[in-house]
Image: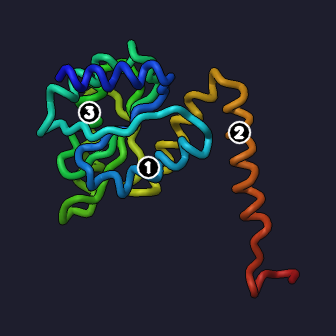
Amino acid sequence: MERIIEAMKTSQDAGVLVGVVMGSRSDYAVMKAAVEILREFGVAHEVRVVSAHRTPDLLHEYAHAAAERGLRVILAGAGGAAHLPGMMAAKTVVPVLGVPISATALQGMDALLSIAQMPKGVPVGTMAIGAAGATNAGLMAVAILATTDAALREKLVAWRAARRDEVLGEKLDDEVGS
């Protein structure tokens, strides 16, 4: 546990604002979409495996120390029973965005419902299942940070304008008026 605490202190020194956590290493295949967004916007972040079931002490320490370390948002990806986002939210006041991951025969629906059905008083922002949800979690984290960071807000406005311009620039072969 001391090694964990030391690693978290290092993150604090680096000005980390967003924690990206997931229940297992295999979940990174999905959560990397959030990491890519955070990198694109230059948002300082950390990435860790924090399992609600296999490392509950780490989960509690991570969540408990999150605000003190300067984290402003936590993105938590989990499949199956998906306890990670809810348990993280129960132990911190830092906003938690849950990303359901398809890890069982139920193709992520179990995780989605687990994350979405939090009891009153323990909110978790719930994203879509899979990479689209991870991308949106990254963008939501950027939007949350942008409420107090004018430069980041300008980047987000420009990013959205670029997406708009991509769509407006697309032409269909059968488009009317072509």
Helix, strand or loop at mark 2? helix
The relative height of residue 101 versus residue 97 in the rendered view (above or below) is below
Q: Residue at x 70, y 56 (%)?
A: 163
**Camera-nearest label, 3 or 1:** 1
Nearest the camera: 36 or 170? 36
Q: Amino acid at mark 2?
A: Lys
Q: Residue at x 34, y 52 (%)?
A: 28
Q: Which residue extends farthest left?
A: 54
Callout 3: 10 Å neighbours few (<14), some, many (20+)? many
Whole-angstrom CA distance, mark 2 to mark 1, is 19 Å
For residue 155, the mark is 2
Q: Amino acid at mark 3?
A: Gly
Whole-angstrom CA distance, mark 2 to mark 3, is 30 Å
Helix, strand or loop at mark 1? helix
**Residue 146 picture location, percent across and down:** 63, 29
Image quarter of residue 39: top right
Image quarter of residue 119: top left
Horizontal side, residue 86 vs residue 147: left or right: left
Location of the C terminus (image quadrant): bottom right
Callout 2: 10 Å neighbours few (<14), some, many (20+)? some
Label 3 close to label 1 by CB (< 8 Å): no
**Residue 45 picture location, percent across and down:** 47, 34
Q: Please say which color scheme the image uses.
A: rainbow
